[in-house]
Image: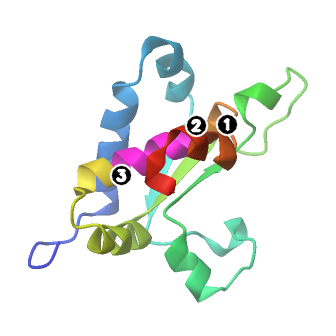
């Protein structure tokens, strides 16, 4: 990204939306009900250790909500299911992975977070996704 303008949060959201639009049929409709939000960093209220600056740089994305495998008709959601994408940590990881494009990285983080929406754990994802090993 050196020498190029940094992408905006809107541009990162647009990459995520294109990624979701390309999902196969069984996943596409449930994915449309999930909000996508990009900000520079994870908000303190979503952190395990609010204010931890190092943690803020480590988190590229987050799913907040109730996974589909755990939803009940009795649930009263406090907020919509949301996939969060954090621009500054994504750009930092991009610097560490020169073989990866911005589109590839944002798509990867997006799919990872949507996997949580569909009920997959980090261990489930790591078992089939070599990116995280």
For marks 2 and 3, give the CA distance: 14 Å
Q: Secondary structure at mark 1?
A: loop
User: For this view, does 115 lie left or right of residue 89?
Assistant: right
Q: Residue at x 85, y 24 (%)?
A: 72
Mark 3 or mark 1, which has the lower sequence index?
A: 3
Q: Residue at x 40, y 32 (%)?
A: 20
Q: What is the crowding at mark 2: few (fewer than 14 residues within 10 Å), some, or many (at least 20)?
A: some
Mark 2 or mark 1, which has the lower sequence index?
A: 2
Which quadrant would residue 1 be assigned to in this image? bottom left
Q: Are marks 2 and 1 in contact (CB under 8 Å)?
A: yes
Which residue matches tag 3?
106
- Give the residues in magenta: 106-114
**Magenta region includes residue 127:** no
Query: Looking at the image, which residue sits at the far left?
Result: 3
**Magenta region includes residue 110:** yes
Q: Nearer the viewer, residue 25 or 78?
A: 25
Which residue matches tag 1?
120
Q: Secondary structure at mark 3?
A: helix
């Amino acid at each position: 990204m050196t020498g190029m303008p940094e992408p905006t949060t809107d541009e990162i959201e647009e990459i995520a939306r294109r990624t979701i639009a390309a999902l196969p049929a069984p996943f596409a409709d449930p994915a449309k009900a999930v909000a996508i939000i990009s900000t520079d960093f994870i908000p303190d209220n979503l952190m395990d250790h609010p204010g931890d600056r190092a943690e803020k740089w480590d988190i590229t994305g987050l799913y907040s909500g109730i996974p589909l495998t755990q939803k009940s008709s009795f649930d009263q959601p406090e907020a919509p299911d949301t996939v969060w994408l954090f621009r500054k940590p994504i750009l930092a990881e991009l610097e560490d992975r020169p073989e990866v494009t911005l589109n590839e990285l944002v798509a990867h983080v997006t799919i990872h977070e949507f996997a949580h929406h569909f009920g997959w754990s980090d261990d489930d994802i790591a078992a089939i996704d070599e990116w995280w090993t």
